[in-house]
Image: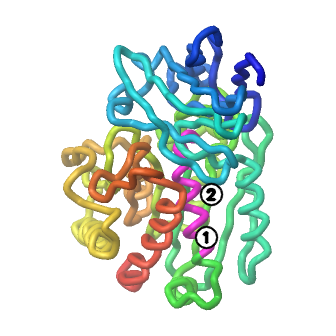
Amino acid sequence: MTDTLSITSSFDAGNIRVLSTDTSGDIWRAELEIVADHNSDFYQWFHFRVAGAAGQRVELSIVNCAGAAYPGGWPGYQARGSADREHWRLLETSYSDGRLTIALVLNNIVNWIAYFAPYSMERHHDLVAWAANQPGVIHTELGLTLDGQPLDLLTLGEGAKQVWLYARQHPGETMAEWWMEGAIERLCDPEDSVARLLRAKATFHIMPNMNPDGSRRGHLRTNAVGVNLNREWHEPSPERSPEVLHVRAAMDRTGVDFAMDVHGDEAIPHVFIAGFEGIPSLKPDRLALYNRYRDILAARTPDFQTKVGYPVSPPGRANLSMSTAQLAERYGAVSMTLEMPFKDNDDLPDAEYGWSPARSMQLGRDCLAALAEMIDAI
């Protein structure tokens, strides 16, 4: 038995600052704060390790939540916890007066707590290494980030349609790379009929993680110098956004027929997509294909819905600094932003896991199946 409460975030994607601890009572308590992204005011992602006496009840209060990037994301939210870093369950969580309080019992002495199930850079490298060794997959290092990390592109398929899938422009949205793992595994399965059809009709260009620096640093939304990559697509630069610069240059070489930018939303407890309705060169046939894809996906999986989402941009008012609008305008692509929840999917809640890595991976598989139903029309 020990009277020590240890809290640390000194690891890949870790983020928390310890303000105080109190182990004098029956319930051990700590006050914490989330650290803002470097050179930025954005913060909401947290990920840390808690160690202490087995069987000890602990209450952890994150005290600076009112100033987070999306304070509307806290009401109704539950943190994730894990003893083995594989299974991430919902924790007892409450929010009041700008404080998020997480309660748990240290049954396993060491516990990990996170805003959502983390997707580490080590797991990213394992995914890339596995995929790059599958038949027909080509791995390309597009360039390096500002921290010197590689930007990994996976290319597979022999068809004429050019499909781009990319994730984690916002590094704290880890469900996006869990989605990628599910999608990549399906596309690489030689016995999967959806994968076989898609690879025959399209060439897939896949960026599992567009923001390795922010991912490793434990950022919510920005890269190594505090830049939101999804506001750089109109004019990326090597000083601010080499990630977008390299990816957009690759897209210029291939063209883009269909694109999906995979994200997570802090506040909305649903899965939904957002499109390109407000671009200056909007073409009715491309918008019809976007709507067709949305409707197919809604029919295919109860984890997706079309009633709740973001407001549609007025005609000619789309933000071309964002990738979905820029790709639709630049290439005539059927492009979209997919959003998954940090909370649960209120249409189909799971009291133990909430929205989870497994559901994110399954959605990746389902999104490919929806695309297979209309790939000839893209």
Q: Quadrant of residue 319?
A: top left
Mark 2–mark 1 distance (CA, rounded to whole Å): 9 Å
Q: How many marks?
A: 2
Q: Is residue 227 visible?
A: yes
Badge 2: few (under 14), some or many (20 or more) residues near its Cα, within 10 Å? many
Q: Secondary structure at mark 2?
A: loop
What's the residue at 72%, 76% (across, down)? 137
Please give the residue where the numbered disc 2 appears in the rendered image: 208
Tell whether 179 sits left or right of 120.
left
Of the residues shown, which amino acid type is indicated by label 2?
Answer: Pro
Q: Name the amino acid type tagged 1.
A: Ile
Q: Does label 2 or label 1 sit earlier along the sequence?
A: 1
265 left or right of 160? Answer: left
Residue named by callout 1: 184
Residue shown at the point (43%, 18%) measured from the top left: 99
Q: Which mark is residue 346?
A: none
x, y percentage for residue 162?
52, 73
Q: Which residues are magenta?
A: 168-185
Look at the numbered disc 1 and give the secondary structure of its residue. Answer: helix
Q: Residue at x 39, y 16 (%)?
A: 98
Display coloring: rainbow
Callout 2–callout 1 Cβ contact below 8 Å:
yes
**In which quarter of the view is residue 51 placed?**
top right
Residue at 55% over, 32% down: 104
* Nearer-the-camera pick, 43 or 160: 43
Instruction: Give the answer, above or below, for where 129 lies relative to 233.
Output: below
Q: Nearer the viewer, residue 59 or 332?
A: 59
Q: Is residue 138 left or right of residue 326?
A: right
Report x, y in % for residue 152. 71, 57
